[in-house]
Image (tube, rainbow, N blue to C red):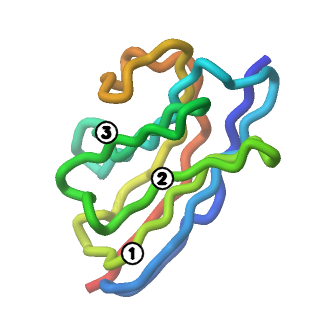
Amino acid sequence: QVQLVESGGGLVQAGGSLRLSCVASGRTFSGYAMGWFRQAPGKEREFVAAIKWSSGTTNYADSVKGRFTISRDNAKSTVYLQMNSLKPEDTAVYYCAAGKFVAIDAADSEYSYWGQGTQVTVSS
């Protein structure tokens, strides 16, 4: 059974940094795309970044390009989201997701597995 466990969220001032981690277990993830999504209060869940587990190919939402970096550590079965230059509008619950044979720009509905989420709050 696939499990995704996020950590690393918290409260940070605008301009600060956080690194989110997502530990994946339950199977090998070659052929999978791993995504980060976020949902702010009263808003729909939105795509943040994705990475192909095997190739390392990445994709980012325009709103985070140049500030966020997604990466993975195969040995640790962990996907990271390094978030720099954080803004108040980045405040949301951040979710890790996994989907087999999912395109790098796929919508959240294409992902099969989800973590429980981790709260990121950026104060102004």
- Of callouts 1 and 2, which one flags the residue occurring earlier in the amino acid sequence? 2
Residue 3: mark: none
Q: Quadrant of residue 124?
A: bottom left
What residue is rendered at 33% in x and 64% in y? 91
- Of callouts 3 and 2, which one flags the residue occurring earlier in the amino acid sequence? 3
Above-or-below relation of 105 to 65? above
Residue contact at pointers 1 and 2, CB within 8 angstroms? no
Residue wearing tag 1: 84
In the image, 93: left or right of 9?
left
For the residue labelled by badge 3, is the local secondary structure a helix, a strand or a loop?
strand
Residue wearing tag 2: 70
The residue carrying pointer 2 sits among few (fewer than 14), some (14 to 19) or many (20 or more) residues within 10 Å by Cα, namely: many
What residue is rendered at 27% in x and 59% in y? 64
* Distance Cα–Cα, label 3 vs label 2: 13 Å
In the image, 114: left or right of 89?
right
Q: Quadrant of residue 103?
A: top left
Query: In the rendered image, which quarter contains the N terminus?
Result: top right
Above-or-below relation of 11 to 28? below
Q: The disc labelled 2 sits on which kind of residue?
A: Ile
How far from the left and from the top, in percent, is residue 34? Answer: 53, 34
For the residue labelled by badge 1, is the local secondary structure a helix, a strand or a loop?
loop
Q: The disc labelled 1 sits on which kind of residue?
A: Asn
* Distance Cα–Cα, label 1 vs label 2: 12 Å
How far from the left and from the top, in percent, is residue 80? Answer: 58, 55
Residue wearing tag 3: 47
Q: The disc labelled 3 sits on which kind of residue?
A: Phe
